[in-house]
Image (cartoon, rainbow, N blue to C red):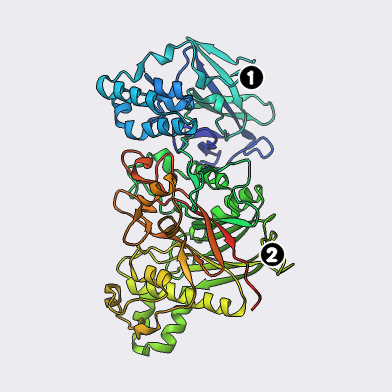
Amino acid sequence: MLSVVRVHLPSDIPIVGCELTPYVLVRRLDKTVINDDVPESAPIDGHFLRYKWYRIQSDKKVALCSVHPSEQATLQCLGCVKAKIPIAKSYHCSPKCFSDAWQHHRVLHERAASAVNENGNKEEELFGRYNSTGSGALNASLSGSASTPSLTNGSAPLYPAAITQRSGGETWFEVGLSKTYTPTADDIGHVLKFECVVVDAETKVPVGHANTILTSRVIPAPSPSPRRLIPVNGADMMHIDSDGRISSSGTFTVLSYNILSDAYATSELYSYCPSWALSWPYRRQNLLREIVGYRADIVCLQEVQCDHFEEFFAPELDKHGYTALYKRKTNEVYTGNTLTIDGCATFFRRDRFSHVKKYEVEFNKAAQSLTDAMIPSTQKKTALSRLVKDNVALIVVLEAKFSNQGADNPGKRQLLCVANTHVNVHQDLKDVKLWQVHTLLKGLEKIAASADIPMLVCGDFNSVPGSAPHALLAMGKVDPLHPDLTVDPLNILRPHSKLIHQLPLVSAYSSFARLGVGLGLEQQRRRLDPSTNEPLFTNCTRDFIGTLDYIFYTADSLTVESLLELLDEESLRKDTALPSPEWSSDHIALLAEFRCKSRPRR
């Protein structure tokens, strides 16, 4: 007969909306051990496995800390209650927790006050009382509180009517009958129990004892403060509306986001991030929520694993009206599982655009052509070893289903070329980075020469503002005296005069520095590097804070209407490191709204 050897969960902290899949190890009659599911429809050795999930409801209601959601709350911020901030954000597990989080927490108060146009007097009074006496928080025994608004769900009953077991002040409710279970809002603050038992396929009677495992208390999925869309003409800020369109008639929005491949999201690299927040089942749901919430017309993602694209992002975004295109990195260098190779994925809304053409750029092929043409045969192996890094770019030509053309151009097709790339990461290969960017731009120049078409160049360029690749993109050339050009062991960057292009590219986020006036723009300008007019950071880890990601556009054919606000270190909480429970990548998303300029026919 079958026997269960071991049952465990990859993470014992369950999160609302993130599927729990237990690992069940089973020994067969012949002593072999398997971890396959054994359903009633396909018994093995005359037996199958039966699963049950229970929610354990204590007679005491529990509120969870908003900063450390695995901890029970003991404090509640009165300012949040008065400002009608979501109640879950008002709870803290200790005075130290509240104090440490204060710089971030007060932003919630400021935004709430701004939203209702208050004069700030009440807020200043509250801040003063907390800063001087600490009385801005209500010290209460929340676990025994008679009213906890965060634990009620309107008029609907919290729990099913059927009680399965009751013991010592606890009630166990059956909530699932399959191997997997996805916690809901009703589970917040409660422990879950998974039960697995071997059942005789003929008699349907359990054999042996049940194997069980308890989780920690279910926590809500952390939600970062929403990022606002800020018009560059200084008009009022707008919140991205998940139920409505953020782009107005004749405009479209583009998102660029390195989502951090699961293969790279290791506890060794990101030891400061809780293991449950680093797990792929959690991160994929959090990333999807974020991406869908932006409602961008075009989405350019980097570091998308092949299996995650096919099994998750493509089908999930399809449900939201997106068509998906993908270019996997080549695997001449990569030695792992080919399914976990990452690549670039571009999505577009079917109701806004149609697909015209797709180009794939494999820098490995370009490297082969370069070495065949320029490198002596005795040095080719060394040259290819330096140049072949598996990086790619995905170029997509789309046709808009909307129009902002005037009466002088009735019915003219509005095409758009979108490039999505991820340039090599190694900092000592400055020549390779610049060569890859130059190669991509030369390919885009050929497309531009064949059609009158606006262009966007998006991605993670692994190049900081002021570097040679950034200069080539933003200025159209590289100063021959640029220090990056001293790294060129293969002489592939010579003559330096060839490092040019004719595309009128401008960085979208530099619009914050160049255009408009207004409170929102002034705040964003403080988040720019004044020497380059680029964001202070788009990548933020314990080891590195800087800008690597950009959205460039052809300024002769497109204008920037608005931009997604930049984050500052305060927005990322005290430790200022990504990924975190709120933000599931080590990069931040960039989003720009564009309008096509009306131009006469050539």
Quadrant for the N terminus in the image = top right
Q: State the CA–CA distance, disc 2 to disc 1.
A: 53 Å
Mark 2 and mark 1 in contact? Answer it, CB < 8 Å.
no
Determine the image quadrant of residue 133. top left
Name the foreground residue: 312 vs 286: 286
Question: Is residue 209 at all visible to an observer of this figure?
Answer: no
Tag on residue 370?
none
In the rendered image, the vertical position of residue 318 relative to residue 28, given as above or below: below
Q: Would residue 274 be seen by someone viewing this image from the given angle?
A: yes
Mark 1 residue type: Ala
Q: Which residue is mark 1?
A: 156
Q: Earlier in the sequence, mark 2 or mark 1?
A: 1
Query: Is disc 2 surrounded by few (<14), some (14 to 19) or many (20+) residues within 10 Å?
Result: few
- Which residue has dot 2 on it? 406
Q: Could you tell me residue 151's position as x and y percent? A: 52, 20
Residue drawn at x 43%, y 11% is: 144
Of residues 473 and 171, the one nearer the viewer is 473
Task: Say which amino acid is labelled 2.
Answer: Gly
